[in-house]
Amino acid sequence: MKKIVFSLCLLAVSLGMANAQKIKGSDTVLPLSQKEAENYLQKHPDANVTVTGGGSGVGISALLEGTTDIAQSSRRIKFDERNKLKTAGKTVKEVIIAYDALAVVVHPSNPVKKLTREQLEGIFTGKIKNWKEVGGPDMKIVPYSRETSSGTYEFFKESVLKHRNYMSGIMSMPATGAIVQSVSQTPGAIGYIGLAYLAKEVQAVAVSYDQGATYVAPSIEHAKDQTYPIVRPLYYYYEAKSEAAVKPFIDYVLSDEGQATVSGLGYVTVK
């Protein structure tokens, strides 16, 4: 008997109680882990895998607490997180399972189709407040961000804002899907999402990291050839002592079949 239940932040797959594994963390990695688990369980009907979201920080905290077997993360583990795990007697291993291009999105009616990194920094730090300042209409900019526990929040701050703080009072969303929904309903909105979440309800803008000399739109092709500048690795973290239990699933994700799923869902393969 097989039971699969999908929700925005939860996939529970029950195919017997043997080989139970829990995967938790990044909202960006969530759709990928869900699909990989579904495909894996078709080949291993004796396994039991549960995949939940909540953010990269949530997943790594769960690994520390012993409530997950694999922490999925869209950022690298922090120094203090690794130290806490070490203090708790946990040796953690890291595996890159895919790469992700981070798309900056606006409302489809917005005529602004390209932005420089400096303009994005100004928008998300609150220095640029109106679309007319970046060649658009006289309309207030409404920036949407992920919440602080999100690896996407951390990566965007590092890569785009160059470690500068987000504007005070920025609209923080608990999940990537909420950013897509909010931007699609707000003409002056702007946000950032993983490429796999890109939908017709929002419009991705081309981005320049050379002060406007060249602009590149987010795509798998541009991420692979490294012309798109906002690309990051996606990770699985697990305890070394649990390697025997989690390795079959991780090996499947890294296999040709697993990486075909990576590509099919809009992520970038590791090879």
Image: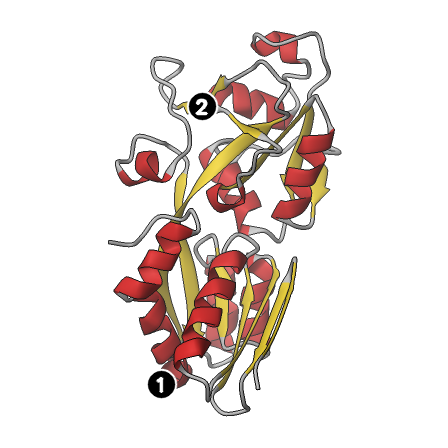
Q: Residue at x 36, y 66 (%)?
A: 253
Q: Amino acid at mark 2?
A: Ala
Which residue is pictured at 57% across the width and 34% down the height?
200
Q: Residues within 10 Å of mark 1 (few under 14, many from 20)?
A: few
Coloring basis for residues:
secondary structure
Q: Is residue 47 left or right of residue 53?
A: left
Give the answer, above or below, for where 97 lies relative to 107. Answer: below
Structural distance between the alpha carbons of marks 2 and 1: 43 Å
Say what amino acid the circle numbered 1 marks.
Ala
Between residues 220 and 193, which one lies in front from this camera angle? 220
Q: To which residue does mark 1 refer?
A: 244
Q: Position of residue 240 (x, y in %)?
A: 38, 79
The answer to whether one can see residue 147 in this image is: no
Q: Position of residue 224 (x, y in %)?
A: 29, 40
Measured from the top left, where is residue 135 in percent x and y? 57, 7
Asked if the residue at tag 1 contacts the one at tag 2, i.e. Cβ–Cβ closer than 8 Å, the answer is: no
N-term mark: 2 or 1: 2
Look at discs 2 and 1 and give the one toward the viewer. Answer: 2
Query: Looking at the image, can residue 139 be seen?
Result: yes
Q: Is residue 251 left or right of residue 242?
A: left
**Could you tell me which quadrant the C terminus lies in?**
bottom left
Q: Residue at x 41, y 83 (%)?
A: 44
188 over 221 or under it: above or below: above
Q: Residue at x 52, y 65 (%)?
A: 34
Q: Between residue 93 and residue 232, name the one nearer to us.
A: 232
Residue at disc 2, secondary structure: strand
Label 2 neighbour load within 10 Å: few <14, some 14-19, many 20+? some
Residue pointed to by mark 2: 206
